[in-house]
Amino acid sequence: MASTLRTSNTQLLARRRVFNAGLRYSSTKTPCTTYLKPTHIAAADAASTLPATATENIIDTYARPPFVLSHGKGSWLWTKNGQKYLDFSSGIAVNALGHADEEFANAMNEQVRKISHTSNVFHNEWAGQLATLIVETTKKEGGLGWVPGSTSDTSKTAKVFFSNSGTEANEGAFKFARKIAKEKYLASNPSASYADCNQIKFVCFANAFHGRSMGALSATSNPKYQKPFEPLIPGFNVGELNDYAGVEKMIDADTCAVVVEPVQGEGGLAVCEEAWLRMLRKRCDEVGAVLIFDEIQCGLYRTGTLWAHSSLPVDCHPDIVTMAKPLANGYPIGAIMVRGEFAPYITVGSHGTTFGGSPLATRLGHHVLSRLSSPAFISHMRDVSSHLASRLQPLPSLFPTLLHPSIRGKGLLTGLGFQDPTHPGRLVQLARERGVLMLTAGKDAVRIVPSLNAEKDEVDLAVDVIESCLVVLKEEAASK
């Protein structure tokens, strides 16, 4: 099967290179019109072939398209009916190495045959190795208070806690922040108790997405997600991203933590300004609050560097980083990395997990991060990212009545903002009917998140399809 998929994928790329030789669109003058007509099965036809087992015992929490995916290879997916899709959703920015990566599969097979789970009652071979790799790569690439190239810096360190998902990582980070504030309070007030500490509030920001469990949901200020589950956890105050005037007012002596995504993923691909992050850092230091960067979607090279904050000056860096999505290429894992000076406050019994940090999860995480952090991989990823940006950049000028004037996001977490909030969902549908899978983001954006090892040819096909879909969308809008 793997050999067949590899051959068919290679042949498909070769055919597209020949086809595109005379039809390569630069997206600078005229949009591609090759894909005006659907090439993949219509929703109504697909629904009639959807097996009952796909829906009859599954709770309907997702509005899925009516087909069943059976296998994949690299950036490509196949349905049970044999249709091929170019996957520029990558499992919601998860599949860093694409689908059915052979080296990843070999690592999984080897570890499963050895030991997969022990619980955290015991040490295992790989948890410590992955924690060390995360910390040392952060020193090398920059982040959490280190400038790039700090591999010889032994004056400070960091510690890591492993969870099963990004939501769990954020929940743990919130607990850590409360614990840090209360332990510091008790150290200054020896006769006091935990209940006496008033530094218990959190500051989060509009359009953020931190997860769907009750604590993470309380920091996810979207009524669509929150309303059915109110009342939520008290103590979460919502500010506006890049609002300089609101920082001092929002963050006060009762604030134990500020949580922010340096680049919002689900919320619409907004990027935090460097000067604003610096202001957050300064204000957190003034009141003794912990600064948490949720890099679950934007971290681990998705935006071009290890962390979205890696290239920023250290006076913009956080105290805690949460991570998950690409760390094990789709195998469930999450992690919390904490500055060394705060780690002693997180003591035995402060937090726990049954499955987090298992030998299998951390072996896979170590394998993935080792490959993502290699110079050759980073160089290729940045080259493809630059090519994608060059293809997207002219689109707002080509479609000024449809699109906002600037490309959203950063690196391979990027996309297009739309004037009409109904258009992102429609464009995703049109692209899917032409064999390309993408996502919406927030209220008005399409999110483009290919695998981190995607190829330029795949970018060209995806953007050619997007251009054709924008032509269709423009014609539909004009006919209303």
Image (cartoon, rainbow, N blue to C red):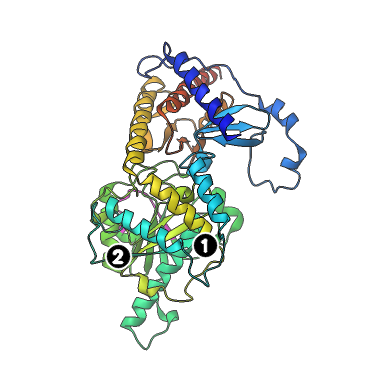
Give the residue displayed 30% in from the left and 58% down from the top. 144
Numbered circle sitting on residue 129: none
Mark 2, residue position: 157
Q: Mark 2 or 1 closer to N-term? A: 2
Bounds of the magenta segment: 237-247
460 or 33: which is nearer to us?
A: 460
Which residue is farthest bottom? 191
Q: Main secondary structure of the magenta part?
A: loop
| Relative image position of residue 72 (x, y in whole percent) | 57, 35
Is any part of residue 391 visible from this angle?
yes
Q: For the residue carrying disc 2, how many other residues have a C-alpha within 10 Å: few (<14), some (14-19), or many (20+)?
A: some
| Relative image position of residue 476 (x, y in whole percent) | 55, 19
Q: For the residue carrying disc 1, how many other residues have a C-alpha within 10 Å: few (<14), some (14-19), or many (20+)?
A: many
444 or 144: which is nearer to us?
A: 144
| Label tally | 2
**SS for dot 2:** loop
Mark 1, residue position: 356
Gap between marks 2 and 1, in whole Å? 22 Å
| Relative image position of residue 82 (x, y in whole percent) | 65, 27
Q: Is residue 370 above or below residue 161?
A: above
